[in-house]
Amino acid sequence: MVEGQTRVEKEGEALRLLALEIRPQKAGFAVFEGATLLDWGVRDYGPTPAFRRIGTLLSLYAPSVIVIRRRHYLKHGDTVARVVQSIKRGAQRKSISVQSLDAHRIRAFFKQQGCESKHAASTLLAEWFPELAWKLPPERKPWQPEPHNTLLFDAVAIAVTFLIAQS
């Protein structure tokens, strides 16, 4: 990932991290073990209770920690806040730590890396994790909707920022 970066460990073993980018009808996720990207994707949950769709990730990957981007929800705030609360309750039942990472901190980290836009940050992540390169969405115009795969790059950005901050 980044030269000289240390593996994040917890009690002698690599930390298993689940990073989530929550939106009203879908969530991007990235699973890391230490600095190794294990899995990634986007889960649509629509009218299905969100925790049922996202909760399967907790059972499948058994993370040590979940990291969610903290932000001020302007549009659809109640929906996203309810999803985050259900994830926190489910994680608490499984004794999984839930951390939140401020959106400003994520942007600041990528700005230090020379990334002025979300697409530049996604491109950098695709360079660090070549397995994601084929998922890199094209740069969007201001009038275009955000591509579906952007959520998975947002989740990876959350995880990378968290891992760097912890090392």
Image (cartoon, grey):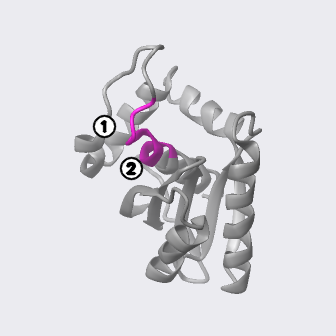
Amino acid carrying label 1: it is Leu
Placement of 98 over or under 111, stated as above or below: below
Which residue is denoted by mark 2 in the rendering? 1
What x and y, as percent, mark residue 136?
A: 31, 37
Hey, which quadrant is residue 103 in on the image? top right
Is residue 15 among the parts visible in the rendering? no
Q: Is residue 62 left or right of residue 147?
A: right
The stretch of residues the image draws in magenta is 146-154
Residue 38 disc label: none
Q: Is residue 162 left or right of residue 123?
A: right
Instruction: Point out the image quarter for the C terminus.
Output: bottom right
Q: Do the numbered discs 2 and 1 sit on residues whose CB atoms are within 8 Å?
A: no
Placement of 64 over or under 162, stated as above or below: below
What x and y, as percent, mark residue 105?
A: 69, 38
- Residue 152 magenta: yes
Which residue is denoted by mark 1 in the rendering? 136
Q: Residue furthest left?
A: 134
Is residue 32 among the parts visible in the rendering? yes
Query: Which residue appears at 58% of the width and 47% of the height?
Result: 23
Query: Which residue appears at 52% of the width and 20% of the height?
Result: 116
Q: Secondary structure at mark 1?
A: loop
What x and y, as percent, mark residue 74?
A: 75, 33
